[in-house]
Structures are given as structure tokens and as C-alpha cells.
């Protein structure tokens, strides 16, 4: 009897573990067809009239972005609980950061869908840390300005997705290491304002003149359905750059 109970417990554990793995961790199935995608977006997004899917941009195996031609919007999809779900739908296609794993900057993706009538030749993304000086406990700390740019040409496509540039990742990694070091982490971080990067963008024509930009009727509208870290990028103008 005892042996049967043990065997039964083992079988139950294996079945339970198998179900959990199947339900939460199994590989994604094929993505819905373009027609299914448009139907689901139009049903989920109030007032949407999406008819043309431009592409499928994978952030990783379980996270994917769909740029649409109509209103040049973006939809964010996640594989969760054995199905592809809409995490968020945006109108207008303004650039955003999708922090797929908020604790891992290497998973961060910048996504955009620029209207062709903008006549933009390039879009530049910026990581900026503003100068800062603070004083406490008779110790001063100066934080220098940091400005990093990643330019993307729009000649081949008005939409896209990029990972954070290596330069940005290196800086974020160095900051994280400094915060967790015995000296910085226990003393300086508690005494001073924690410096952080501000992420932004700007559009340029072929002469590198900035463009004000025009957007669709649903620009700025966003509907979220899942708890994903998707954030707007700020506009950074030439006058703010050094």
C-alpha cells in the first residue's frame, strides 16, 4: 500500500509538473494569420479600422510587434497561457520602448511606425543623462552629461524595431555595477540623487533638419490589455542637444 501511495504521488507530481510546463513554458505555436490579426485588433481597439498588416517584428520568441498601414499604428503581442494575446494597441506609431524583461536592458526594444508622408529620411534615438551636482555629508558629487545617439535611416522602411545599442547597454551595466558596489551602493546611492538616462527621439530630413511631424487621427491613443512595460519616448529637439 505504501509503495502504491508513493508511486501515485510521483505520478501526480510528474503530471502536475508537465501541465505547468505545458501551460506556462511551452514554445509558442504559429502566429495568427494577417486576417485573424486585423480582426482581433479591430475588435479590441475601439474605433480601429485596421486592414493591412505591414510586418511581424519579433522581440523574442514570445513577444512580437505588428506595424499596420492603417493610421500607421502598432500592436504588441505576447505568448501567454498557450495563446497569442494582444498586450497593447497604439494609434499613430510614435516610437516606444518595450522593456520585455524590465530587469534586463538587453531585452529592451525601440519600436516605431512613421507615416511615409512625413518625408523623413532618418530617425535618431537618444540616451541623455543631464548634468547634476549634489552635496551631502560634506561630500560633493558631480554627474556629467552623457549624450548617445543611434541614427536609423528610413530609406528602406518607415517602420522597424531595434535593440538597445551596445554603447547604451555598456553604460547601463556600468551604472548598475556602481550602484551595487560596496561603497557606491551603501553610501553614495543613499545620499545623492540617482542619475538616470532619459530616452528620446527626433525625425530628420535629408539635410538633417528636424521635422515637426504629422500624425494620424488616433495618434497618442493607446489601449493596454496585459501588464507589459511599454513606454513612450520623449521628443528631444536639436536645441536640447550638445
Image (cartoon, rainbow, N blue to C red):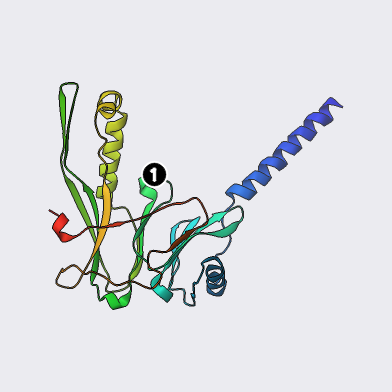
93 vs 49: above or below: above
Q: Is residue 183 above or below residue 48?
A: above
In the shown orientation, is residue 163 left or right of residue 124?
right
Which residue: 76% across, 33% down? Answer: 9
Viewport quadrant of the N terminus? top right
What x and y, as percent, mark residue 118? 27, 75
Which residue corresponds to mark 1?
104
Name the foreground residue: 91 vs 102: 91
Residue 240 drawn at (x, y percent):
16, 55
For the point 57% across and 64% down, the residue is: 30
Q: Is residue 206 left or right of residue 160?
A: left
The quadrant in which residue 27 appears is bottom right
Q: From the viewer's perspective, is 104 left or right of 8?
A: left
Q: Residues within 10 Å of mark 1 (few under 14, many from 20)?
A: few
Of residues 26 and 211, the one drawn nearer to the viewer in this rendering: 211
Where on the picture, by quarter, is residue 12? top right
The answer, for residue 8, to whether it is visible in the render is: yes
160 on left or right of 153: right
Amino acid at each position: 500500500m505504501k509503495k502504491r501511495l508513493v508511486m501515485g504521488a510521483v505520478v501526480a507530481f510528474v503530471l502536475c509538473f508537465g501541465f505547468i510546463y505545458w501551460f506556462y513554458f511551452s514554445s509558442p505555436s504559429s502566429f495568427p494569420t494577417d486576417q485573424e490579426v486585423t480582426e482581433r485588433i479591430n475588435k479590441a481597439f475601439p474605433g480601429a479600422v485596421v486592414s493591412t498588416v505591414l510586418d511581424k517584428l519579433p522581440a523574442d520568441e514570445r513577444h512580437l510587434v505588428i506595424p499596420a498601414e492603417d493610421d500607421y499604428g502598432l500592436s504588441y503581442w505576447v505568448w501567454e497561457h498557450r495563446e497569442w494575446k494582444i498586450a497593447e494597441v497604439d494609434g499613430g506609431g510614435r516610437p516606444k520602448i518595450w522593456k520585455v524583461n524590465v530587469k534586463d536592458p538587453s531585452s529592451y526594444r525601440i519600436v516605431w511606425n512613421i507615416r511615409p508622408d512625413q518625408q523623413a529620411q532618418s530617425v535618431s534615438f537618444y540616451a541623455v543623462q543631464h548634468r547634476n551636482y549634489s552635496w551631502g555629508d560634506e561630500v560633493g558629487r558631480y554627474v556629467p552629461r552623457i549624450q548617445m545617439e543611434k541614427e536609423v535611416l528610413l530609406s528602406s522602411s518607415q517602420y522597424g524595431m531595434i535593440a538597445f545599442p551596445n554603447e547604451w547597454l555598456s553604460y547601463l551595466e556600468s551604472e548598475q555595477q556602481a550602484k551595487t558596489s560596496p561603497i557606491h551602493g551603501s553610501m553614495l546611492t543613499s545620499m545623492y540623487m540617482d542619475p538616470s538616462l532619459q530616452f528620446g527621439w527626433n525625425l530628420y530630413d535629408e539635410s538633417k533638419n528636424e521635422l515637426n511631424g504629422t500624425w494620424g487621427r488616433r495618434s497618442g491613443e493607446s489601449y493596454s490589455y496585459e501588464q507589459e512595460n511599454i513606454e513612450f519616448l520623449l521628443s528631444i529637439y536639436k536645441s536640447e542637444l550638445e
